[in-house]
Amino acid sequence: MQRPGLVLLLLVNVACAAEALRRSPAKIGLGDARRGAVEETYAWETRWYEQRLDHFSSRNATFKQKFLLRAKEWGGAETKAPIFLYCGNEGNIEWFAENTGFMFDIAPRYKALLVFPEHRYYGESMPFGSQEAAYKDAESLAYLNTEQALGDFVTLITDLKRNLSAEACPVVLFGGSYGGMLAAWMRLKYPHIAIGALSSSAPILQFEDVASPYSFTDTVSANFKAASESCYKTIRDSWTLMKRLGSTKEGLRKLSSQFHMCTDLHDSGELGDWTDSAYAYVSMVNYPYPSSFLQNLPAYPIKEMCKAMDSIPESDGMARIFAAMDVYYNYTGELTCFDIKDDPHGMSGWDWQACTEMVMPLSNRNTSMYLPYEWNFEDLAYWCEKNYGVRPRSHWIVEEFGGKDIEAVLKRVGSNIVFSNGLVDPWSGGGVLKNISGSIVALVTAEGAHHLDLRAIQPDVDPQWLVDQRNAELQHIDRWLLEFYADRDDGHAQQA
């Protein structure tokens, strides 16, 4: 039985390749040159908050939660200037702050205070003092769930406002991917805490019996087919070829050598996991300019992967696949070998979340570039019971936050949420793609990738459709703030 997890920011099981669902691939993270530029432009203070372990009992245990704070542009409590809070994802919070430049870029416009709380059990925000202790067993992991994470954000921002005498300052939520889901759910569950939420690339519908389980791999397949028919065909044929070549020890040794692995492969499935990770990730970050969010990549990296693949004769299928992998995992040419088990951003806690509440079915059609695969709850349950001693609650998230009949339900109970999605992003199929009401709106772009709108504004390279999308988002934020100040009739409406 393979690992079931699905790192939401990142990957999914596309060809029964579940090990890839957990890890962030290869060794190249944020390039050193870009990291320096980011830190210079988007500086912050690192702070710690004594956070309650359990928000829903009388237990008084606490842990230290990291959060990042930028007050350089803040207009201050006396002007009731807004607070922008990013809902931390499944990884270290600096990684997300570095790749959410949009918040830093618009902070001067609103004179906003920026707050980036780290999600519990990720990065350095570990209950019980260490990752080893926090991840010890099901009992220690029991406090890793969405409800507790939202409780952290609510408690932290409430105390921060109190300490800054900023109780009258409005809060606007931001988040991308899983963080975008948390932002939307926080706005729905705690509307008295935040006046609105920008929820980018958030698949809040990607749950059982709500959204199609095929949408993710359908989108990845369409992206590669659009780039190159021969590239698409090589990938489609590679799964059975890998299995055949890796069926013997000598074959595995040759594959390990051909793909420059740091250690020999244990089976062909590991190679399948690693390659389908690249296809899924690159579809998510198919940005129109060079980027270093997941790897150091060129502009429109799907085209570059297919170009590299198509430079090699079709008869040499594995050489073509390696050429594409070398673009994704080693575009800078810095690596001499690949470590397929690397987890540079500390996202391993997602296995637990996928085994408890974040049960997001994903299947492959026989018409996609993947082997046919039908998601099976009992397979997932078997793995989770074997590894954690727990059985997933596959419908709990929908019961807790909603999802079915979302148009009718949110129209009655929600307001002030912008759902932004790009259709190149494989997660878009699980997102909200239609307006639900006048204040719960969907901004959909045909060429957009995974929370591209939250990345830093780059006037020289941002396409006009992205500029228009961000301007629409700012108009909604303007309205939320104007309404907030007008409702209080205290003369601050003009500052929005």
Image (tube, helix red, strand yellow):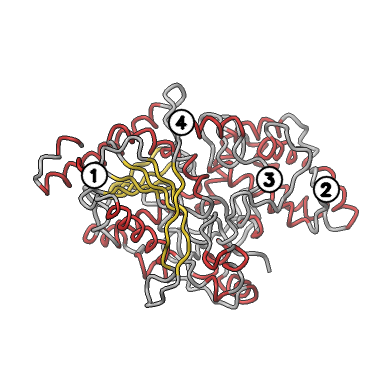
Label 4 vs label 3: CA separation?
Answer: 27 Å
Q: CA distance from mark 4 to mark 1?
A: 24 Å
User: Type of residue at label 1?
Assistant: Ala
Query: Percent from the top left, x then y, of residue 327?
Result: 68, 35
Instruction: Name the residue carrying label 3.
Output: 26
Tag in front: 2 or 4 = 4
Place of residue 27 in the rendered image (x, y in percent of width and height, measured from the top left): 68, 43
What's the mark number on residue 179?
Answer: none
Looking at the rendered image, the disc whose residue lies closer to the viewer, 1 or 2, is 1
Q: How many marks?
A: 4
Chain-order first, disc 1 or disc 2: 1
Q: In the rendered image, which quarter contains the C terminus? A: top left
Disc 4 target residue: 41
Is 478 on the left-hand or right-hand side of 311?
A: left
> What is the three-letter code of the residue carrying label 3?
Ala
Q: Is residue 195 left or right of residue 450?
A: left
Earlier sequence position, callout 4 versus callout 3: 3
Which label sits in the foreground, 3 or 2?
A: 3
Residue sitting nearer the eye, 164 or 187: 164
Residue 486: where, in percent of width, then height? Answer: 12, 44
Q: CA distance from mark 3 to mark 1?
A: 44 Å
Horizontal placement of 338 versus 301: left or right? right
Q: Quadrant where the N terminus lies?
A: bottom right
Q: For mark 2, what is the residue?
A: 255
Q: Earlier in the sequence, mark 2 or mark 4?
A: 4
**C-alpha span from label 2 to label 4:** 43 Å
SS for dot 2: helix
- Toward the right, the furthest residue is 250
Nearer the observer: mark 4 or 1; the answer is 1
Label 1 and label 2: CA atoms lie apart by: 61 Å
